[in-house]
Amino acid sequence: MKTDRPPDTVRAYLDALRNALKGSSPGLISDALADAEEHLQGEIASNPDKREAEILASVIETYGTPQEIAEEYKSMETAIAGPFPKPEPKPERHHGFFSVIGDARAYGALMYMLLSLATGVFYFAWAVTGLGLTAGFAILIIGIPFALLFIGSVRILGHVEGRIVEGLLGVRMPRRLPAQTAADERIWSRIVDALADIRTWSSLLYLLLMLPLGVTYFVIAVVGIAVPFALIGGSLASLVSGHSYVQISDVPWLEHIFHTAPGLAFAILVGGALVFIVLHVAKGIGWFHGRLAEILLVRL
Amino acid sequence: MADESPYTRKFRKELMAGLSSLVLLAVLARAGREMYGYEIAKAVKAEGEGGLIFKQGAIYPVLRSLHALGLLESRVEASAFGPPRRYYSITDEGRRALSDWQGAWHDMREFVDDALAAQMSLRGPTLESRA
């Protein structure tokens, strides 16, 4: 508090608090932020005639600086065992190439990739329809409530997606809908607030991005599942029945593989290796998408 | 407040660490209804003669830990616009804890007062020079 300028908006206060809590468990941070936001908005709501900066200046005296509050939460967490959701115990790191076969995270990511086509199409359609209608209604009297409704729906979709991402990709996402502006603010200032909130835009961007990403993920997942199993299944069937089901007339060496027993055994091995590679790829995509969702959907 | 030495601040903080739980249980027991954080903060008389005794922000982590210990119940009331409010109310276990803690606090206060009185009679008025 001595080095920095004291925060003069709720958002700046919350940012400072988040900074001061860096390194604490995510549950602790979200609790502390929710408490601070509730209190600050309460203070603002009960002093409607004062400016936000004035209120914050006095609130820092009574509520405490972000640094002090961060200290309180940290010492509270260490003082009493179990008051806050503990970070989930870190699963033992499996670095081996083959251990991915037992890694639930990889299957979750694969599931997510399959699901993302449907959700991606839906999100995209919703976002584009909403944007279009909002623009169209902007000149009508229902334009403003419609815009508000649309922004609300974007946040709710973002939240729902957050739940899916947490469930399948294992990235901790907010457990409840993001808090919005004070209840007794006028409708216009709500819109201005929502428009000024980077989260609204980043969530919208996420919903739009989900179409290309979803299509890509889906294709990778379907091909990734089909190819190894076709290789293994097809080659096994050829070995057992003695017939070759693969005709590749232009590439003799490939044709050769599918017509000889050692070649077929090799194809089975390749298929088996591909299963592991695909699981690794799925895990990687899951990790990447988790970060992306964290950046775009969780309040910055 | 600003002229308080760092030791005094630390001392206050350590005192409050345990006592704030007692104060909050007492406030909620007296209210006999559920209250949300901001309301509780306003209900707690946080100012003493020496200025602000503790920061209002400090009650929220205490509320959460009391809740985690089962002494308070909580419920979040979401609102479409405006931050959701977390309402707290005291549980039966909380009431039992409150009466136990009150006893502990009376014992403690007596003990501390006795110790301070003994100190006072030894050192005389030098203790007053702080104020």
Image (spheres, coloured by chain):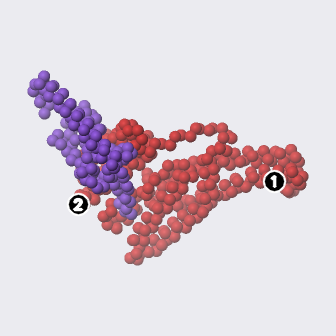
Q: What tint does the image give chain B?
A: purple
Q: Tag 2: residue type?
A: Asp
Say which residue appears at 49% left-offset and 54% top-offset.
A296
- The extreme top residue here reads B122
Compared with B58, B11 (above or below) is above
Q: What tint does the image give chain A?
A: red
- Residue A103 image point, x, y percent: 63, 44
> Alpha carbon of mark 2 to alpha carbon of mark 1: how far?
76 Å
Is the Cβ of the residue at disc 2 closer than 8 Å to that at disc 1? no
Say which residue appears at 81% left-offset and 53% top-offset.
A234
Task: Assign a secondary structure to mark 2.
Answer: loop
The answer to whether residue A122 is left or right of residue B40 is right
| Quadrant assignment, res A20 | top left
Between marks 2 and 1 in the image, the one whose residue lies nearer the viewer: 1
Parent chain of label 1: A
Reading the image, the residue beneath label 2 is A49
Which mark sits nearer the N-terminus, 2 or 1?
A: 2
Q: Tag 1: residue type?
A: Gly
- Residue A98 image point, x, y percent: 68, 41
Reading the image, the residue beneath label 1 is A234
Compared with B46, B6 (above or below) is above
